[in-house]
Amino acid sequence: MAAPGFPAGDFLVLDGVARHYGTVAAVRDVSVRVAQGEFLGLLGPSGCGKTTTLQMIAGFETPSAGTIRLEGRDLAAIPANRRNIGLVFQSYALFPHMTVAENVAFGLEMRRIPKPERTERVRRALDLVHLSHLAGRFPRQMSGGQQQRVALARALVIEPRLLLLDEPLSNLDAKLREEMQVELREVQKRVGVTTILVTHDQNEAMALCDRVAVMQAGSIVQIDEPWRAYDAPADAFVADFLGRSNRLPVRAAKGMAQVGGHAFALPEPLAQARGEITLAIRPERLRIRAAQEAGLPGRVHSRVFLGGFWLVRVDTAAGDMMVMVQNTGTPPAAEGEAVTLDWDPHSLRRMDAAAPEPIQ
Ligand code: ATP
């Protein structure tokens, strides 16, 4: 339950947080409100300030400006070891000379929790990550995925107010990472702990998080539910960071757009645009049609089979377009074949407009 006196939507509030190292602005101006129980992702390329933001929440770094409040309390005066925050890093940082159970119990010993309660809480935490049967093993006797689950159990056993995850799955191979994503999300929802995940992997952030905050050069560019940020990116950076995005340079006039000899009606609000503008469309929103049908003419340059779908590159007068075609058991158009591309104009997003104000 949220403590009285502040809205549950304001469980963790960063307000104008910045961190400078000499002349380097690692974090410029980060403001975000995190609701109790929410799973928020800090997503962005290397060096955009994700880890520094997390370290400030954890208390390992001090903000140069701004405030961080947890349950309404300013964290500035509270040292890292008194913030009751659980941490999981990319390197599991388990104690090699301790068994799994001892590793998980460590934080409880530090907090002087009596032995019977300790044993019970360790048992519950290991149950949660499906590792009870390996309680007596040493870290070196476990796989990467198992070690990461121990690290998660160790973070959760202290019943933290907040769980901070910094690239927790990056050391795992692709298949295991996917499995662990599902598990991590389930555990987080079951425990209900408010969680912040730092990652540069957009798929991971989209799979795990209730909302993603996309960061660029020390600032948040957009905060949204993953599907919204993917569907309506605030700017070209977000559009490209969250996935593939084709560009359609068109000439717009009187509610119509022209590209490569193809004319089509623009829906509102795009219908208001005039002159040379750039539109963006996701590969799965393009459709490949027979050459004689209406649309943007092109020629298949190459196609790659990806199991569930094909990724087809089509050369057009407007440039190369990547098209995602669902696999229905028959290959799509062959390499070299003349085709046309069409799309639902509602799938188009304008990409040359001035970047909107960051959304809070
Ligand atoms: P990565 O995914 O590579 O870890 P990140 O988004 O987490 O990147 P940060 O580690 O927060 O980024 O770093 C942000 C910027 O601040 C980088 O340019 C980094 O070089 C710089 N920086 C971070 N820590 C320090 C420090 N202690 N001293 C000087 N510069 C630093």
Image (spheres, helix red, strand yellow):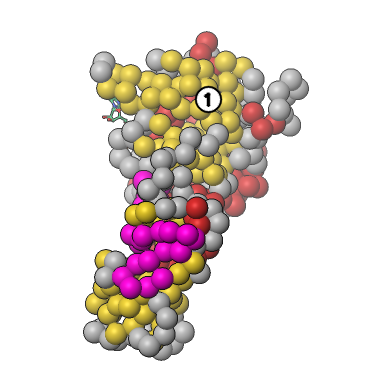
Residue at 64% over, 20% down? 72
Q: Find residue 244 and report its image quarter.
A: bottom left
Residue at 52% over, 22% down? 15
Locate residue 85, reporting x and y percent: 53, 28
Front residue (pair 119, 154): 154
Residue 193 seen: no
Crowd rating for badge 1 (residues with CA inside 10 Å; few <14, some 14–19, many 20+): many
Locate residue 200, reporting x and y percent: 37, 45
Numbered disc 1: secondary structure:
strand
Front residue (pair 118, 311): 311
Residue 332 located within the stretch drawn in magenta: no
Query: In the rendered view of the protein, which quadrant contains the C terminus?
Result: top right
| 182 left or right, relative to 113 | left
Residue at 34% over, 54% down? 276
Residue 15 seen: yes
Q: Which residue is mark 1?
A: 14
On whether ligand 1 comes within 8 Å of the CB at mark 1, the answer is: no
**Which residues fall within the magenta stretch?**
236-263
| 317 left or right, relative to 77 | left
